[in-house]
Amino acid sequence: MPKKFRPVVSETPQSRTAIRGRGASWSPANRFEKLHIDQNDLDVVDVALGTEERPRRETQYFRDGTKSVITRNNSPDVGFETSLNPYRGCEHGCIYCYARPTHEYLGLSAGLDFESKIMVKTNASELLRAELESPRWNPQTLVMSGVTDPYQPIERKLCITRGCLQVLAKFRNPVAIITKNRLVTRDVDLLRSLAAHNAVAVNVSVTSLDSNLQRVLEPRTSSPQARLDAIRQLRSAGIPTGVMVAPIIPGLTDHEVPKVLDACAKAGAQFAAYTNVGATGCARVRSCLARHLKDLRRSCAFSVEIIGCLLPKRVQPHPLLQTK
């Protein structure tokens, strides 16, 4: 009989002080680790965080020595079987991100660590090529990405995602991309090549058209207008492009759904999908807004229990995302 999980760390309440350019304001204890340094403990840090400005958290990048790059899952809730993640962690810092807890498997935190300590798969394209050349590979749609954004800021410099697209284009292997960054338009040449073989679909994720809210919930993503521009550029290049309205946050962004869909349709989006925020994401959103936008605290006074009861629902996905 499995042992009942019991917290091993007693933490002080999380910080109410926001960090500019970050979604999280602290690094909560790792549920798998017995030791934890509480940055709010004045015996540990030199700065009295309640009275002085929070020290800036620089982003650090670490080489990921993984031996394979294609991730598989058999979850009925995911909607795809294989995915490709050029990075682990995401500097976009979306506070609601369901992938945050994956950083705990690396001995890191789901909070600030997830968005400031990024694992980089520098040899991702070589690993991808080897896996696609293997006789064991059953050609199918790869999703970029499942637990990170393939076009987060560092991609502009490292071009790891672009390298993977070059391999996919050579093999003509179908790929479906999900991103919140206009940087995806940089790779129009490769996406156009894949589109010629009906082997690509791009989903631009748009949570809200309110840029003020976007900067709080998704601090290092492209602005809503930049994402609409990305849709226009991709469609003008003949690339199948849709919108992912995700996550929908009841009491905060649900009223925007018709406007988001209308704006994306006018920009050229051909299809759409959506998901609701999960219970843990909902709790993080409430905490985040309490730090940033006092005037919005009333509008987000929804129940975590109610949100947890809402099952993720999606409209019919693009054919590339359909599994047999």
Image (cartoon, grey):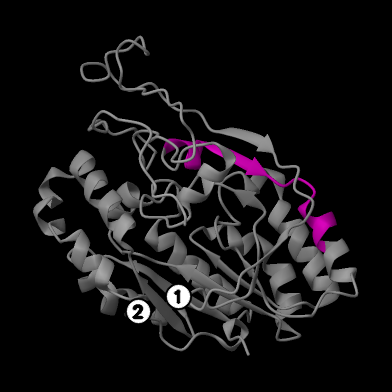
Residue 151, horizontal then vertical, whole percent: 59, 55
Image position of 263 (left or right of 106): left
Question: Is the Cβ of the residue at disc 1 closer than 8 Å to that at disc 2?
Answer: yes
* 173 versus 121 height, above or below: below
**Secondary structure category for the residue under label 1:** strand
Residue 301, horizontal then vertical, whole percent: 12, 57
Q: Where, quadrant-wise, is the C terminus in this rendering?
A: bottom right
The magenta stretch spans which residues? 112-128
Residue 140, image quadrant? bottom right
Q: Is any part of residue 321 visible from this angle?
A: yes
Residue at 84% x, 70% y: name it. Answer: 132
Out of 216 and 98, give the one closest to the viewer.
Answer: 98
Image position of 223 (left or right of 181): left
Identify the residue under disc 1.
243
Residue 239, horizontal then vertical, whole percent: 62, 79
Residue 12, horizontal then vertical, whole percent: 26, 28
Amino acid type, label 2: Leu
Q: Which mark is residue 261?
A: 2
Residue 112, image quadrant? top left
Q: CA distance from mark 1 to mark 2?
A: 8 Å
